[in-house]
Image (cartoon, rainbow, N blue to C red):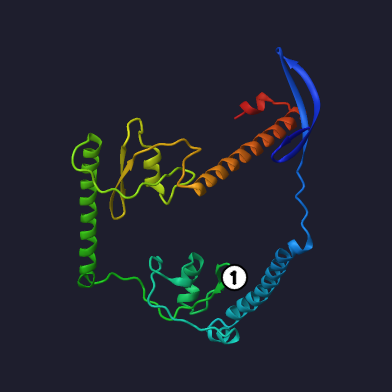
Amino acid sequence: MVETEFGFHVIKLLEARKVEGREERRASHILVAAPAEAKSLDEMRPEIEAELRNERAGRRFAEVAETFNNMVYEQLDSLEPVAERFKLTVRTTPWIEKSGRQELGPLDHPKLLAALFSEDAIVHKRNTDAVEVAPGTLVAARVAEHQPAAQLPFEEVRDEIAGKLRRQEAVELARREGERRLEALRKGEGAAPKWSAPKAVSREAPAGLKGETLRAVVSADVSRLPAYQGVAVEDGYLLLRISKVTDGAKAGDGKQDGEDAAKARLQRAAQIYGSAQYQAYLASLRADADIEIKQEALQRK
C-alpha cells in the first residue's frame, strides 16, 4: 500500500518474470481516496439552501424559456405578443452589418446574427428562434428593414478611406521607427526611452501580456541583460526590455502569482500522473490480450 496526495493505492502483484536478464513485474492497483471531513448540518445549510434555490430557479427558467420559445415560433410575424406576455420592451437597433463588427449588445451572438440574415428573417419577415446568448438570457429578433449590400459612392466613403490610409501610414512609420530604436538599444546606442514600471511575467502568469508580446518576452535571448525585443502591434510598435530573469519557483508579481504558478504546476503533475496510470492500464490490457499479427494482411494492397 502506497500513500500519495490522491489517497492510498492498494497494489497487487500479478506476475514477475525475467526477460533478457531484466526483471519485469505486472501489477494492478486500487485507489482509495481519502474521505472528506464530514460537516455538520448547520455548516452545510447555506450551501444546501443555495443549491435548492438554484434548482428552483433553473426549473422556473426552463418553464419560461419553453413558453417564450413557443410564442416566438407560433406567432412568427410579431414580437409584441411575447413582449406583452412577459412584460418586456421591444427595442429597435440602428443599422447593423452582417459581419457584426460593431457593438451589438444582446444581438452580439453568432447564431442570432446568422438567423437575422437568413432568408426566413429577411424575405419572409419571420421572428428568429429564441437564442440563449448568455446563461439565463434568451433573445429573439426580427428584421424591421433590410438593405442589400451595395457599393457606396466614392464621395460618401472618401473621408473614411483617407482616414484608413493615414492610420496605415502612421502604423508603418511607427514600425520602422520602432525597429530602428530596437537596433540602437541592442547596440547600446542612442538615448534610452522612458520605460513603464517593470513587472514579472511568465507563461503561467502572463500579467496581461498576450500572444506575440508574451512569446517575444519568454523567447528572448537573456544571455546578456538587459535584453530587448520588439513587437508590431495594431496601433504601432512595442519595445520590450527584459532586465531580470528569476527562477520559475520565484517568478510572478507578488504572492498571488506565486500561488497561481504553484497551482499550475500541481495541475500539470496531476495530468502527468493520470496519463501514466492510463498508459499502465493499457499496457496491462495488452499483456493479457492474445494478439496475433498477420503480416500478409498488412502487406496486402
In this view, 293 is above or below 99: above
Q: Amino acid at mark 1?
A: Gly
In the image, 6 versus 237, the foreground residue is 6
Q: Extreme left residue here? A: 190
Instruction: Point out residue 259 in the picture as x, y percentages from the top left corner.
Output: 54, 46
The spot of residue 64 in percent (x, y) is: 64, 77
Q: Nearer the viewer, residue 22 or 253?
A: 253
The quadrant of the picture occupied by the N terminus is: top right
Residue 69: name its quadrant.
Answer: bottom right
Compared with 154, 38 (above or below) is above
Residue drawn at point x = 53 percent, y = 86 percent:
80
Q: Is residue 56 left or right of 181 when viewed as pictured?
A: right
* Quadrant of residue 85 within the rendered picture: bottom right
Quarter of the image holding residue 22?
top right
Q: Secondary structure at mark 1?
A: loop
Image quadrant holding the C terminus, namely top right
| Residue 147 spot, x, y in % from top left | 36, 76
Q: Position of residue 83 (x, y in %)?
A: 55, 84
Residue found at x 78% / y 62%:
41
Does residue 91 appear in this view? yes
Give left or right: position of 167 versus 297.
Answer: left
Q: Which residue is mark 1?
A: 136
Pointer 1: residues within 10 angstroms few (<14), some, or many (20+)? Answer: few
**Does residue 290 appear anywhere in the picture?**
no
Q: Outermost residue, top direction? A: 21
Name the residue rendered at 40%, 36% in the picture.
245
Disc count in the image? 1
Tell whether 282 sits left or right of 163.
Answer: right
Q: Is residue 10 above or below residue 40?
A: above
